[in-house]
Image (spheres, helix red, strand yellow):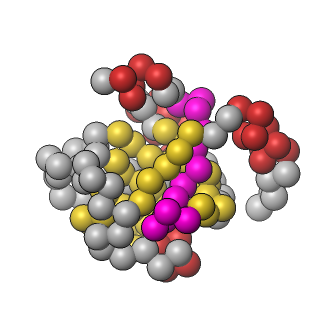
Amino acid sequence: MAFKKIHNNKTRYYFFVKNKNTEIYLTRIINFTDYKNNLIKIKEFPPNFGYFIFNPRGFNSFLISEKLDIIFTDWDNHIFYLERNFKTNSFTKGFKNAKFLYIFPQKTIDNFNINLNDIITHRRMSNKKWRKIEFRKISY
């Protein structure tokens, strides 16, 4: 419960694969409004940005315009389910043991060589650092 109180949807995170920092920056999706503003309304998914959901039961790609890569982790941060090129308007299976769901643009899993049972995590980024990254974003 402390995770829900401390971190909100304005907090940004670094993404780590096998304890190595990547150039992917994460935003948390808390409710349907975040889902609508970040995933449904976006026309092009930026290649170095992703999203995550805490304690998901599954994923629904309803009204999302692009295919995505999705990753589910358990409470030990091990990947137990991943899917490349997840189709639009599709559902995943339901999971009771999922801690995080990570949502990335297409080909992210292949680019970072992510496999089942790998350990992935994220760490909080300071607002000062996020402002620097935001200003040097490349427009697509």
Image check: 25 left or right of 133?
left
In depth, the one of 42 and 55 nearer the eye is 55
In the rendered structure, does residue 135 fall within the stretch colored magenta?
no
Residue at 25% x, 48% y is 75
Look at the image and tell me in which quarter the N terminus lies: top left
Residue at 30% x, 61% y is 78
Q: How many marks?
A: 0
Image check: 7 left or right of 129?
left
In this rendering, the answer to whether 42 lies above or below 22 is: above
Q: Position of residue 71 (x, y in %)?
A: 36, 61
Look at the image and tell me in which quarter the C terminus lies: bottom right
User: What residue occupies the far right of the structure in this picture?
Assistant: 136
Residue at 55% x, 78% y is 111
Q: Which residues are magenta?
A: 9-20
Residue at 73% x, 40% y is 130
Q: Position of residue 88 (x, y in %)?
A: 40, 62
User: Is residue 90 in view?
Assistant: no
Image check: 71 left or right of 125?
left
In depth, the one of 128 and 35 nearer the eye is 128
Q: Position of residue 34 (x, y in %)?
A: 49, 33
Q: Position of residue 77 (x, y in %)?
A: 32, 55
In this rendering, the answer to whether 57 lies above or below 76 is: above
User: Is residue 37 in view?
Assistant: yes
User: What residue occupies the far front of the structure in this picture?
Assistant: 19
Quadrant housing residue 84? bottom left
Quadrant housing residue 116? bottom left
In the rendered structure, does residue 17 fall within the stretch colored magenta?
yes
